[in-house]
Image: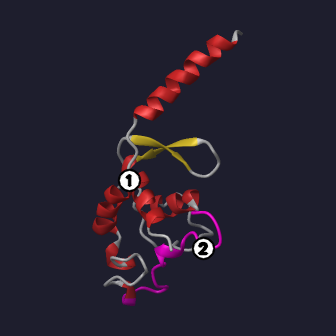
Amino acid sequence: MKPFTLLVPALAIAACASAVSMPEAPEGRALFAENCVQCHGVSGRGNGPWAGALSPPPADLTRLAEGGAFPKARVLSVIDGYDRSDLPGKEMPEFGLLLRGDTVPVDVGDGVLTPTPRPLAALLAYLESIQR
């Protein structure tokens, strides 16, 4: 196979990926306000109006990247409800069905672009933006 025949499909994929507008933190902030503030609070620190009634209390979402990089794959799994068996937050409701839509390519830390529903990617961008 000639190198040129491999290059054409790769360029086509790259062109499609670059044409997709990626969600940014403000888009995710709106979703956070709609779905998360009751438990995690406006600031994301786990101090929402319902926090006092929950045991264990909601996580401080501003500290997800403590000790290293922001754990995108883990955060997506917890929000979506895909796998919480050994993760903190297994008591959290599943929001995966609420966060469906067109997909965007998200690198979850392994260098591979993963198709992710745009609302979920937007929420991820917002959570990453509030890390301290």
Residue 65 x %, y %: 57, 69
Q: CA distance from mark 2 to mark 1?
A: 22 Å
Could you classify mark 2 by the number of other residues whose Cα lies within 10 Å: few (under 14), some (14-19), or many (20 or more)?
Answer: few
Amino acid type at circle 1 is: Glu
The quadrant holding residue 50 is bottom left
Q: Which residues are magenta?
A: 52-70
Q: Residue furthest right?
A: 1
Outermost residue, bottom direction? 52
Q: Quadrant of the N terminus?
A: top right
Mark drawn on residue 66:
2
Left or right: 83 as drawn, with respect to 95: right
Task: Point out residue 72 in the picture as x, y percentages from the top left corner.
Answer: 55, 58
Report if residue 68 lies within the magenta region: yes
Check disc 2 and give the amino acid type: Glu
Depicted 16 relative to depicted 73: above or below:
above
Specify the label residue 24 is tagged with.
1
- On the question of residue 116 being in view, the answer is yes
Rate crowding at label 1 as few (under 14), some (14 to 19) or many (20 or more) other CA atoms within 10 Å. some
**Residue 115 pos. (x, y %):** 49, 41
With 16 as the anchor, is 74 left or right in this view?
right
